Image (tube, rainbow, N blue to C red):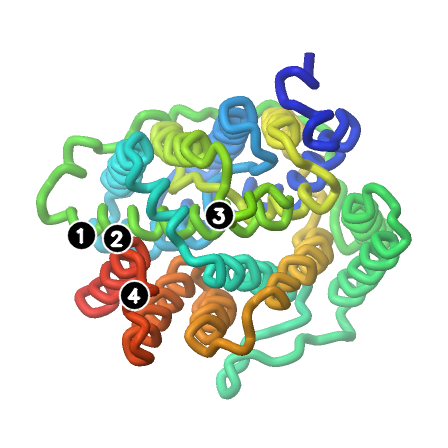
Amino acid sequence: MLDRTFGLTAAGSSVPTELRAGLATFLTMAYIMFVNPAILEKAGMDHGAVFVATCLAAALSSAIMGLYANYPIALAPGMGLNAYFAFTMVPELGGNWQLALGIVFLSGALFLLISLTPLREWLINAIPLTLKLGIAAGIGLFLALIGLQNAGLVAADPVTLVKLGDLSEAKALLAIAGFLAIAGLAARKVPGAIIFGVIAVTLAAVWLGLEPWHGLAAMPPSLAPTFLKMDLAGAFRLGLLTMVLTLLLVMLLDTAGTLIGVARQAGLLDVDGRLPRLRQALLADSGGAMLGAALGTSTTTAYIESAAGVEEGGRTGLTALMVAALFLASLFLAPLAQTVPPYATAPALLFVACLMATSLGAIPWDEPTEYIPALTIALMIPLSYSIATGIGLGFIAYVALKLLSGRMHEINAASAAIAGAFLLKLIFA
């Protein structure tokens, strides 16, 4: 039945492989269950309710992606988007998080409407292949930066912005050991290399007394404080249009970047660099954003950490369905899931980052109008700490260089529209 539903044989996969891949993806993104409530709590929202909303939004939207689009891509409230929600939207709205949730729902609804038309699919398919390669590499470097931060291997510096972390810290040493273990096992073609690395670091941390044992199970908190609390009517005010469109643009570019990056890593793009069943994937993503707002969390989106499951062999929606099941189980096993520290998942992020950065090798390095925009994306995604910003700057560079080199005929309408929209955003927002 599973083979018929997900096409496992045709995808060159199997049930054990897909389940193992789902576990790998879950372990690398499980941190969102604890980070998201901590961030949204600063916006005045109930911590326990946001925890439940985060788990449910991740579970339901990942299940939709798996069953409807049949892709090994998991969804959850997005990092960066939650910070934009808590530290930009809510303060500008006078602390009204209910209205902010209404804006998230409205932007998701617009996202869904665009997805029902050929416009969004046309926009993403029209992205030049070179820029797609830059997006994949940029997301990989972004993952690396997140992993290095979580491991304590890089730290902030008031003069140089970043510096080497304290390598005498046990957490940093465990993360390094975990990364080397994953890389060594992968080089030996050991199945489950990423999972073994994450679990080994976690067990070592508990054994060394770095992490407490939080217990096994507990009943989930109440969802009532955030469920359907969004102010949807207020979100239609004309004065909030800029905020709605800005969030919509960020969602569009973030989703495009994640889908392209993960799909390329999985070998799911066709010979023209296009993603089959893109419309279904887009509908699942936009629907997830609306669902998350209704439950009481910031924008739900496709997760770049899905690349960890892809590396474990995940190729179908069964991987995403496994992630959904684990998020549902986490509602009752929150103390156990909380035992996995960020520096235990950091080695997985670093390893996947190395794999995704290999797309740089396919960029035509003999053509400046192609490799400079691609490299702009790859560098600016991590340096601006924003997938959307990096992509937007890359498109601006692409269009500008093509015009300056007299190759205007190589600029398609989608590239020009994205570059123009982002340029206007930079100027007026």
Q: Is mark 2 on a helix, strand or loop?
A: helix
Local crowd size for mark 4, using a 10 Å CA cut-off: few (<14), some (14–19), many (≥20) = few
Q: In the rendered image, which residue does mark 2 sit on?
A: 246
Q: Residue 38 carries which label?
A: 3
Q: Do the residues labelled 2 and 1 touch (CB within 8 Å)?
A: yes
Amino acid at circle 2: Thr
Look at 56% across and 40% down and name the residue there: 33
Q: In the rendered image, which residue does mark 4 sit on?
A: 409
Q: Nearer the viewer, residue 75 or 72?
A: 72
Q: Which of 174 and 4 is in front in this view?
A: 4
What is the CA distance from the residue labelled 2 to the residue labelled 4?
A: 29 Å
Any part of residue 101 in sight: no
What is the CA distance from the residue labelled 2 to the residue labelled 3?
A: 24 Å
Q: Where is residue 301 in the image (x, y as percent from the top left)?
A: 45, 41
Local crowd size for mark 2, using a 10 Å CA cut-off: few (<14), some (14–19), many (≥20) = some
Amino acid at circle 3: Ala
Q: Is mark 1 on a helix, strand or loop?
A: helix
Answer with left or right where residue 387 lies relative to residue 411.
Answer: right
Does 235 appear above or below 332?
below
Where's the C terminus, which quadrant? bottom left
Q: Nearer the viewer, residue 312 or 401?
A: 401
Amino acid at circle 4: His
Look at 60% across and 67% down and name the residue there: 360
Answer with left or right where residue 47 lies relative to residue 154.
Answer: left
Q: Mark 3 or mark 4: name the one nearer the start of the chain.
A: 3
Q: In the rendered image, which residue does mark 1 sit on?
A: 242
What is the CA distance from the residue labelled 4 to the residue labelled 1?
A: 32 Å
